[in-house]
Image (cartoon, grey):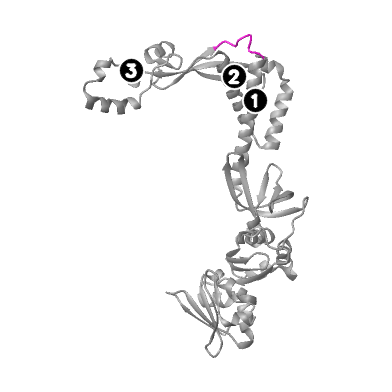
């Protein structure tokens, strides 16, 4: 048993591995692998030779440790040839072709390679590029310096494994809602403690008017997970339209069970959202499912969004019905659509025009974004009072009157 394993209490070592697996999500296999790599690096540094491949094997149950040297089986066809200088000066064209082939070949190193003839004396049915293992002696003075080197590499590799584990976990959760405690605020960016790691709620992904206090627990959606030199960067959002969608998925079992489907959403964060819902089963009211008894479901979502208004409309495959529904709560008299230009002319009574347009054109703007149609709102006399493009740009005299 080597000096390093003598220094370790086996039960404590096994307990530490279990703790790392539970608390940091780093598997025992990853930990053992990183330790073996660290011990191999330390051994090669103190006792190895250039080109050697050293492999350590640690038994976590017994604490026993062994070292092996790996040699790759090769033959003459895989090796680079050593030519005389005068030979290299001739036959230039042949050399070019040979150089291309030589690039794929290797330089023989007796510490790293073994010729197939020699390898067959050890293993009869050995194949080219197969790896043979040769046991190495554990040095008596494999002491504190090597142990310290191994310890540092172990710490580094475990951190790397933990970072990779965090990246994989949160990358797979991209698009999900998480709950975290506000840890600090720097340059208007909010840093949330998610337990295993810290995530950022950037200024541009916050909702205007919301106030964030240190120690407060808030929800947000994971919208971007990236690898960086400093580790995994997790960016959150409370202003993204999908945040509203995910909140409804949590509150409405029919959406989770795919009985009700959210077909489209448009949002002006902190002010108002519109969602279009559709039922995949007859007899199920999609709007009623999202509103809930006495409005309990939609009010829970509104509360999480700080009082943001939410219009829930029924989705329709008929563009005229969809456009009319999207302008809720206004009552629409008629809708004419042009499928080629994707434009819809909407006629409403005089007392419904302000509702259809909304304050500063917000209602028609969100309706256009929701449907993907350009919407012209006209009075009964045929006068255009407001226009909204599918990008949400609104023009018209009717906006100033709201």
**Whole-Å distance between the Cαs marked 2 and 3?**
33 Å
Tell me, yes or no, if residue 336 can be seen here: yes
**Whole-Å distance between the Cαs marked 2 and 1?**
10 Å
Relative to 93, 234 lies left or right: right
Q: Residue at x 59, y 27 (%)?
A: 33
* Res 76 label: 3
Query: Residue farthest to the top?
Result: 140
Q: Earlier in the sequence, mark 2 or mark 1?
A: 2
- Dot 2 corresponds to which residue? 42
**Quadrant of res 255:** bottom right
Assign the N terminus to one quadrant of the image: top right
**Residue 245 to residue 323: above or below:** above
**Residue 92 to residue 303: above or below:** above
Q: Which residues are magenta?
A: 136-143
Q: Viewer-nearest of labels 2 and 3?
A: 2
Q: Nearer the viewer, residue 395 or 307?
A: 395
């Amino acid at each position: 048993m080597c000096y390093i394993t003598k220094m370790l209490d086996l039960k404590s070592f096994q307990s530490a591995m279990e703790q790392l697996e539970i608390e940091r999500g780093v598997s025992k296999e990853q930990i053992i692998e990183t330790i073996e790599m660290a011990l191999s690096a330390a051994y090669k540094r103190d006792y190895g030779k250039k080109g050697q491949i050293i492999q350590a094997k640690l038994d976590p149950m017994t604490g026993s440790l062994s070292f092996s040297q790996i040699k790759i089986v090769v033959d003459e066809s895989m090796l680079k040839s050593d030519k005389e200088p005068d030979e290299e000066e001739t036959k230039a064209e042949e050399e070019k072709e040979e150089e291309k082939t030589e690039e794929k070949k290797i330089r023989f190193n007796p510490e790293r390679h073994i010729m197939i003839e020699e390898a067959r004396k050890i293993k009869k049915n050995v194949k080219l590029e197969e790896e043979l293992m040769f046991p190495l002696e554990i040095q008596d003075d494999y002491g504190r310096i090597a142990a310290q080197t191994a310890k540092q590499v172990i710490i580094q590799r475990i951190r790397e494994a933990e970072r990779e584990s965090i990246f994989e976990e949160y990358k797979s959760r991209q698009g999900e809602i998480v709950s975290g405690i506000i840890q600090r605020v720097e340059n208007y960016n909010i840093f949330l403690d998610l337990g295993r790691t810290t995530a950022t709620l950037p200024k541009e992904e916050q909702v205007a008017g919301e106030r964030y206090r240190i120690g407060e627990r808030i929800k947000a959606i994971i919208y971007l997970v990236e690898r960086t030199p400093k580790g995994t960067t997790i960016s959150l959002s409370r202003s993204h339209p999908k945040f509203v969608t995910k909140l409804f998925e949590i509150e409405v079992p029919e959406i989770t069970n795919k009985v009700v489907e959210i077909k489209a959403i448009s949002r002006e964060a902190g002010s108002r959202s519109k969602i279009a819902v559709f039922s995949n089963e007859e007899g199920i009211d999609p709007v009623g499912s999202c509103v809930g008894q006495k409005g309990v479901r939609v009010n829970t979502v509104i509360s999480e969004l700080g009082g943001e208004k939410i219009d829930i409309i029924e989705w329709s495959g008929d563009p005229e019905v969809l456009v009319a529904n999207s302008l809720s709560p206004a009552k629409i008299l008629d809708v004419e659509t042009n499928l080629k230009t994707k434009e819809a002319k909407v006629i409403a009574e005089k007392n419904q025009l302000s509702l259809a347009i909304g304050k500063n054109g917000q209602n028609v703007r969100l309706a256009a974004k929701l449907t993907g149609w350009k919407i012209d709102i006209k009075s009964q006399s045929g006068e255009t009072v407001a226009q909204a493009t599918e990008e949400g740009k609104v023009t018209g005299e009717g906006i100033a009157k709201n």
